[in-house]
Amino acid sequence: ISLFDRVLEINPRDEAALTNRAIAKVVLKQYDSAREDLEHALRISPLSAHIYQKNIFSRALQIRPCDPVVYKWRGDARSKQDDKRQAALDDYRTCVELNDALQLARKHGLIKAPTKTRRRL
């Protein structure tokens, strides 16, 4: 992340640095900050950022395939595209299923509850 920070100090409008920093932040579970980077990239260049956005969530899911937040975000992005509405619904369903599975696993002591406050979906 620090490398992307340095690039953005030199050029705050570098879309690639913003989107790649967002991916790194997703891996580190810094979801709100990752979303801010993506929104900033979209403001700078809506068309370019849109192309990056398509790949960001798929790349994040390769790294964190059971993360309901990433499915929720990809569903949000897809819901804005007329031809991706069904895919958005599928992502939302997966998000809910994963979230329910995590809650059940925590309830039965299979995994520990996070020590931080629960993240928003």
Image (spheres, helix red, strand yellow):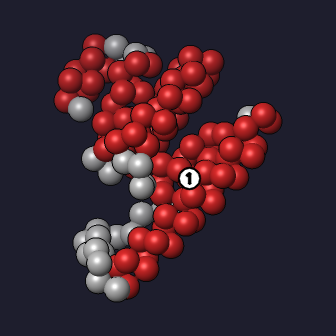
Amino acid residing under circle 1: Lys
Does residue 5 appear to the left or right of 98 in the view shown? Answer: left
Between 87 and 42, the one lying in front of the other is 87
In the image, residue 87 sits, relative to residue 54, either above or below, namely below
Which residue position holds label 1? 72
Does residue 91 appear to the left or right of 3 in the view shown? Answer: right
* Residue at screen point 37% across, 77% down: 105
* Residue at screen point 33% across, 31% down: 21
The image shows residue 76 at horizontal and vertical percentages of 63, 46
Between 79 and 104, the one lying in front of the other is 104
Task: Please indicate, yes or no, whether residue 56 appears anywhere in the rendered image.
Answer: yes
| Residue that extends furthest to the right in the rendered view of this protein | 82
In the image, residue 32 sits, relative to residue 57, either above or below, namely below
Report crowding for label 1: few under 14, some 14 to 19, many 20 or more residues within 10 A (C-alpha).
many
In the image, residue 40 sits, relative to residue 111, either above or below, namely above
* Residue at screen point 28% across, 47% down: 28
The image shows residue 106 at horizontal and vertical percentages of 35, 79
